[in-house]
Image: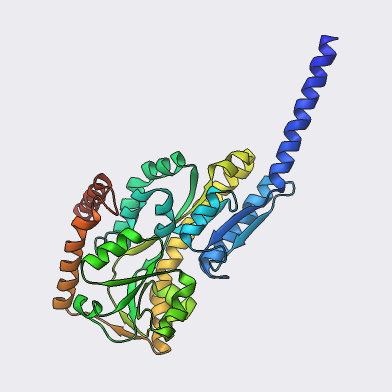
Amino acid sequence: MFDRMARYAGALLLCGLMGASALASEKPLRIGTLAPKNSLYHRQLLEIGEAWRQAQGGNAKYVVFPDGSQGGEAELARRMRIGQLQGALLSIVGLSEIEPSINALQSIPLLFKTWEEVDYVREKMRTSMEKKFLDKGFVVLAWGDAGWVRFFSKDALMRPDDFKKMKFFSFAGESEQQEIMKSLGFTPVPLETTDILPSIQTGMINVVPSTPYFALATQIYGKVPHMLEINWAPVVGALVVTQKVWDDMSPAGRQALRTAGEKAGVQIRNKARQEVEEAVEAMRKRGLVVNKPNPDQLREWQELADKLYPRIRGNLVPAETFDEVFQHVKACRSGRK
């Protein structure tokens, strides 16, 4: 009798586990991003999804929402927390909503001189940074970047003082960065990316910090046709999913997602860096004016960055993380020498 009861209980448990697995597989894995539809980033997300769907099996569904259709990056982070999205491809703007120390990879202007330095520092900090995200309930699947931030403006502007007369687009969620800009005499205007074009047209903003690829993809360069050729900061990003959805996946699904994410990260980094110059050249043929600062003007920009560092350290970037990044950059340069 007890043997029959045990077998019956075991059968019920097996059915329950199979039912739970089937239910989890029927819930779509929904990924949000600001990346434009059919862009490099969107295509890579679709490839990741196909690899995961096949490995997960069953009725696994995977949906990508491009073009910021689910809101700005702060909103994407919020939607993941409440379960409306299970993942997102985010820049530092959205990632810092989860873990503020990630700002160290993007929010220290004119620190990084080459992509080699960016890669070196990211890899040195990767394990500890991914642990911080996991502690917050998120799994990092891929690290990518999208080029260097440059300044697109309506008129030709060369020196930092020229920009003090202008109104800057600023991400709505970056209140601390906006306060730092104001303290140095600049005028940030907090907006979502979908508001950039109409805000240029109405005169609400006349400077847009942007990567060349984004400027080309969104056609904003047609309204702000001057680009200052200075690599202000790299745009670094990552694909994250919630730990909850990660734990609900089959082992095969997790492995496929991890492998496809790692592969996509490499492809995104390599292709995005190539597309920086391709995008600049394509825009130049369509009327973009590229303004290259002279050595004296570059020195003024570095002096501005030096003034920003004490304000960033301990505010935008935790002090210990700020110091760690500088140490890694120094080590990278010493190694090259």
Position of residue 217 in the picture relative to residue 155 (left or right): right
- Can residue 9 be seen in the rendering of this structure? yes
Left or right: where 153 falls relative to 76: left
Along the horizontal axis of the image, is 49 left or right of 271? right
Q: Residue at x 60, y 60 (%)?
A: 64
Against 8, residue 88 (above or below) is: below
- Quarter of image, res 274: bottom left
Quadrant of res 132: top left
User: Residue 90, position in %: x, y?
Assistant: 47, 58
Query: In the rendered image, which quarter contains the C terminus?
Result: bottom left
Q: How is the image coloured?
A: rainbow
Q: Examine the image and state in which quarter residue 225 appears.
A: bottom left
Q: Position of residue 296 (x, y in %)?
A: 13, 77
Image quadrant occupied by the N terminus: top right
Q: In the depicted view, which residue is nearer to us: 10 or 164? A: 164
Any part of residue 264 in sight:
no
Residue visible at 29% across and 77% down?
A: 229
Front residue of 171/267: it is: 171
Give the residue at x 53% y 70%: 36
Give the percent coordinates (x, y) of residue 216.
Answer: 45, 78
Horizontal side of residue 111 vs 54, given as left or right: left
Q: Nearer the viewer, residue 207 or 229?
A: 207
List x then y, in percent, for residue 292: 25, 81
Q: Is residue 84 above or below residue 248?
A: below
Determine the residue located farthest toward the top in the rendered image.
1
